[in-house]
Each structure stands twice: as C-alpha cells, then as structure tokens.
Image (tube, rainbow, N blue to C red):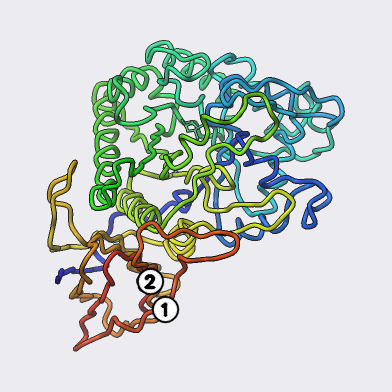
Amino acid sequence: KTAKMIIDKSFKISEIDSRIYGSFIEHLGRAVYGGIYEPGHPSADNNGFRQDVMELVKQLQVPIVRYPGGNMVSAYNWEDGVGPKEKRPKKLELAWNSIETNEVGTNEFFEWAKQVNSEVMMAVNLGTRGIDAARNLLEYCNLPGGTYWSDLRKQHGYKDPHNIKVWCLGNEMDGPWQIGHKTAYEYGRLAAETAKAMKIVDPRIELVSCGSSNTAMPTFPEWEATSLDQTYDYVDYVSLHTYYGNRDNDTTNFLAKSLDMDDFIKTVIATCDYIKAKKRSKKKLHLSFDEWNVWFHSNNQDKQIEPWSVAPPLLEDVYNFEDALLVGSLLNSLINHSDRVKIACLAQLVNVIAPIMTETGGASWKQTIFYPYYYTSVYGRGTAIQAIVDSPKYDSKDFTDVPYLDQSIVYNEEKEELVIFAVNRSLDNPLHVDVDIRSFEGYSIEEHIVLANDDPKAINTLQHEAVKPVASKESYMENGKLVLVLPKMSWNVIRLR
Ligand code: AHR
C-alpha cells in the first residue's frame, strides 16, 4: 500500500505547549505507596522515594504531573497529609475502598516532583468540600508567609512557597460515581465561586473547569455548556477525560479509536466557542486533556480485591503491543490539536494504568506504552505542522474512512529538526509513504525508530521485554523526496536534519 504526504513548514498548527506530555499520580492502588514511595526499598532516598522510579520518570521528561486525584480528591482532606507524619490520620479512602495512611501529602509530593523536574498540577476537592478548603490549600502552597496557612507550611519545614500554577476545580464532577457528584449547574456555580476566591488569593494561577468524564456520558456535551456558562470568565481550561479498550478483541476498530479523541476535542472546542460567543467574550478557552489512556485489562481482576487495605494492586493493566500503537495515535491527536490542547496527562504514571511498573521491594520496568510516550515527549517539542495526507482507508465497526496512515509532524526550529510520528494501522501490509518535504531542502534521515511486533498481544514483563524499539534502515531519500517504509502494525518516529 502507498500513501502520500506533503510537509511544509509554513503549514503551522501551533507552538506545542510541552505540558501536553504531562502525566498523573493519584493516591490509588500502588501509584504512591509501593510506586514512587517505598521507604526501605534499596533504591529509596532519605524521603522514601524510589530513585529507580525517579530515573524512569526523568527519562520520560514529564513536564507536569496532576495530583492527588482523580476520584480520590473528591473526599480528600488535604490537611490530613501535612505536618508531622506520626500525627497524620489513617482514613478510609472512599473512591477506591482503600485505607489512606497520609504518609505522603502535598509537601512530599511537591519535593518528589521537583526532583523529577516536573511541575505539579493540583486538584482541589469540590465533592465533599468547597471554597474554604480550596483557598486555604492555595494559601498554604503559594503564599510566601505572614498568614496562618502560609506560616503553617513554614512550620512544616517548607520555607519557600511551592508556587503551584495550575489547579483543577474538582474531578469528574459529572460522574454519578463521584463523591459529591453534582448537576452541571450546581458544579458550575461552586466552581465559579471557588475560582473567584482562588484568583483573589493568587492571581497568577491557572484554573481548569471540569468537563465530561467521557463522550458516552448522557450529559455530554450539555455539561460543558451549562457549567462553562458559569465558570467561563474565571477559568483558563476545561478538562477532557477518556479511556479506550479493546473489549471485543477487534484490533482494526481499536486502532481507529484516536478518531474518537479527535471528535471529542472538536466537540469541546465548539462548545467552548459557543459559550464565548454567547458571552460576547474575547477570551479563548483552552483544553486540558488531563486523563487519557487505554484502561480495561484490569477491570475484572479489580473486582476480586478485598476492600480496605493499604495500597492494593488496583488498575494494574498489563499493556500489549496494540495498546502501544493506540497510545502513539492518541499522542498524534494531541499534537494535531495543539492549538487548543495546552495540557494533557497520560493517566497514570506508575503502577496504576501506567507506563512504569514496580515490584514492591524489587525492580521497576517499562510497559509497552512507555516507548511511544517517551519518544513523543522527548522529540515532540517545537511547532506542530499540518501535513497534507492522502492515505488508503478502511472501515471498521465504529468508524468509516480510517486512514491506514496516522501521523503528526513536529518542527523543532532551534535544533533544525523535523520529526514525523507515524502509525501504520494495517494488520497485514507495510505502508510506503512518499513524502514531499519541499521547505526542508537538504534535510536527510537522521534516525528511524520502529516499534513493531507480529503479535498484537505481545507484552513486556520485568523478565522479558518483547516490545521494544529498534532502528530501521528501510526508509530512504530519493531525488530530494523522502520515502518512508512503515512495517505492518507499527509505530514509528523518523527524525530528519
Ligand atoms: O485514572 C483513574 C480514574 O479514572 C480517576 O481517578 C478518575 O478521575 C477517572 O475516572
């Protein structure tokens, strides 16, 4: 099969906000306890943080990490997680039926994030709490001192403010599963008033209004319209969440699911712009896709887990090769919408639906999805370019006209580097792509890395890495044109200079 593509540096989508390569750590399962934090582990530092895990996180160059939830935040009292550790209460964690020891809280997580060179994106509880708890937490984190909450932070050993910039106004408040679930209007009112107070406390912050938990929610997209009608003037972003799965074992359909992400983004942009018009506003709202991933493998096993234990092994999806291909395409979708999507978080980062896994007391290892995330985060910095593509297509159960070629293009002007991220969705055939790189005269292939496997269900384990990137020499330049050779079922990154 053959596809054609034109890449021209003047076809700019946007400068990419590097925060689209963000991730997420929730107090859920073994993400914190036994994941990033395990005092007594051979690699733990003085604060109990596993340095082997830190090293893997640093490799991923994660610019921002959302914390502390997720569903967990909707019944969380942040005050339980600060101050002397021996005085912190053990509490029932209602979202995941677990016990929360509160050994790790706001300050410890901030320290951890600093060490892995990430910013913190903090969520406040708008389920069981509201304006007061949110403004106090902000004062505790961001004010230099001289007030009750900022002085308390100092007493707790943190002289300098954390200066956390991005704050989420609750989590998935449209979901009936959420503690303190609200109607769109109830949420909009509370979020707007909370936002107003928070921006008085610290006008430098950016705020995220809760959007829908996924497109299948019966309230989507009315939720966005009604809640943004209240919050629009106070917030900077609206959130999107989505998780995909291959429950019917239909790989061609599964690999097309990034088209659903495209549609989701377009609908939310349209809704934001409708509210903008309704309000005669000059402000353009941006999108924070602050939870996205594949999540379904662990659903049944999670039903067997006994409630009320500390750090049970929840949501430990073991990802396969086809999951890595979809993750690659979802990253392409985020890049291709980088004019409006300014933050995105792969949910999550360690052990819980994560690219990084740990053995408690043992080693850490990379899941299949680690690789597209790693390469896209490292090389996907710069300007997103709109490619003109002519690809053969297929129809699947839920989608029509699915291009076999899925791509995003990034031009890094500083490094004078052109980067092509490409997925060949065909299960049977390699794809040849004739690329006209017109405005990149003199550029040639620096590196072509491929993630390919004959078995869509191949997985990585601690002992054996079945899915790992290899260098390819198949693609070539011919008379100034680029010819890409993409193996069947493959994710590729091609760097030209
Ligand atoms: O990431 C796992 C869960 O998925 C989060 O807690 C919640 O926000 C979403 O439903």
Determine the residue positioned at 55% across, 34% down.
205
Taking the image as shown, residue 41 lies to the left or right of residue 17, namely right
Q: How far apart are marks 1 and 2 (CA)?
A: 6 Å
Q: Quadrant of residue 125?
A: top right
Q: Name the residue under label 2.
A: 450
Q: Where is residue 102 in the image (x, y as percent from the top left)?
A: 74, 30
Determine the residue positioned at 38% across, 12% down.
185
Which residue appears farthest toward the front when viewing the image? Answer: 304
Taking the image as shown, residue 133 lies to the left or right of residue 403, namely right
Mark 1 residue CB less than 8 A from any atom of ligand 1: no
In what quadrant of the picture does the C terminus appear? bottom left
Mark 2 residue CB less than 8 A from any atom of ligand 1: no
* 50 over 164 or under it: above or below: below
Determine the residue positioned at 25% across, 34% down.
267
Q: Quadrant of residue 29?
A: top right
Tell me, yes or no, whether the two marked residues, 1 and 2, touch with CB atoms within 8 Å. Answer: yes
Taking the image as shown, residue 8 lies to the left or right of residue 239, namely left
In the rendered structure, which amino acid carries the disc numbered 1?
A: Ala
Q: Dot 1: what SS?
A: strand
In the rendered structure, which amino acid carries the disc numbered 2?
A: Val
In what quadrant of the picture does the N terminus appear? bottom left
Give the label on residue 271, or none: none
Residue toward you, 208 or 279: 208
At label 2, counting other C-alpha atoms closer than 10 Å, the crowd grade (few under 14, some 14-19, many 20 or more) is many
Q: Where is residue 112 in the image (x, y as percent from the top left)?
A: 70, 47
Q: Mark 1 points at which residue?
A: 471
* 25 over 80 or under it: above or below: below
Q: Dot 2: what SS?
A: strand
At label 1, counting other C-alpha atoms closer than 10 Å, the crowd grade (few under 14, some 14-19, many 20 or more) is few
